[in-house]
Amino acid sequence: MTMIYHLAKQAAWTEAEAAGLYRGRPADRADGFLHFSTAAQIADSAAIHRAGEADLVLLAVPATVLGAALRWEPSRSGKLFPHLYGDLPLAQVAWARPLPLGPDGRHVFPPLDEAPS
């Protein structure tokens, strides 16, 4: 099973836990989809788009549970990235973990599932 990953602000995740639904950040809503990354992409995505942000939560979601709302689309350098067109029900989140910053200011990721689906 392929896991895909999303970086959420802690405040947005807290709201989602109360509502049972994660709607993403303003940039996601402006683009019309929730931005996800694979295990191989997430560290670069964090470094490029969320550098130095200390209040992030890493969400892991099995790609297969998202159905037709999940599309793999080209992004930077033509690489395919998973985009979720819709809100994310919390029941589909396998786990959520705080994503701390290391002493060098880069995010410290837990081990991630890179197994193919």
Image (spheres, helix red, strand yellow):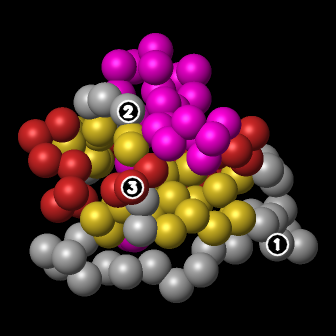
Q: Pointer 2: residues within 10 angstroms few (<14), some, or many (20+)?
A: some
Does residue 29 show up magenta in the picture? yes
Q: Which residue is mark 3?
A: 91
Q: Pointer 3: residues within 10 angstroms few (<14), some, or many (20+)?
A: few
Quadrant of the frame with the N terminus: bottom left
Which residue occupies the extreme right position in the image?
103
Q: Which residue is mark 2?
A: 87
CA gap between label 1 and label 3 equals 30 Å
CA gap between label 3 and label 2 equals 12 Å
Please tell me whether mark 3 sits on a helix, a strand or a loop. helix
Please give the label number shown on residue 51. none
Quadrant of the frame with the C terminus: bottom left
Q: Is residue 46 above or below residue 23?
A: below
Q: Which residues are magenta?
A: 15-43
Q: Pointer 1: residues within 10 angstroms few (<14), some, or many (20+)?
A: few
Q: Is residue 90 above or below residue 74?
A: below
The amino acid at mark 3 is Ala
Please tell me whether mark 2 sits on a helix, a strand or a loop. loop
Q: Earlier in the sequence, mark 2 or mark 1?
A: 2
Quadrant hosting residue 102? bottom right
The amino acid at mark 2 is Asp
- Name which residue lies at 48% across and 30% down: 23
Q: Nearer the viewer, residue 59 or 15?
A: 15
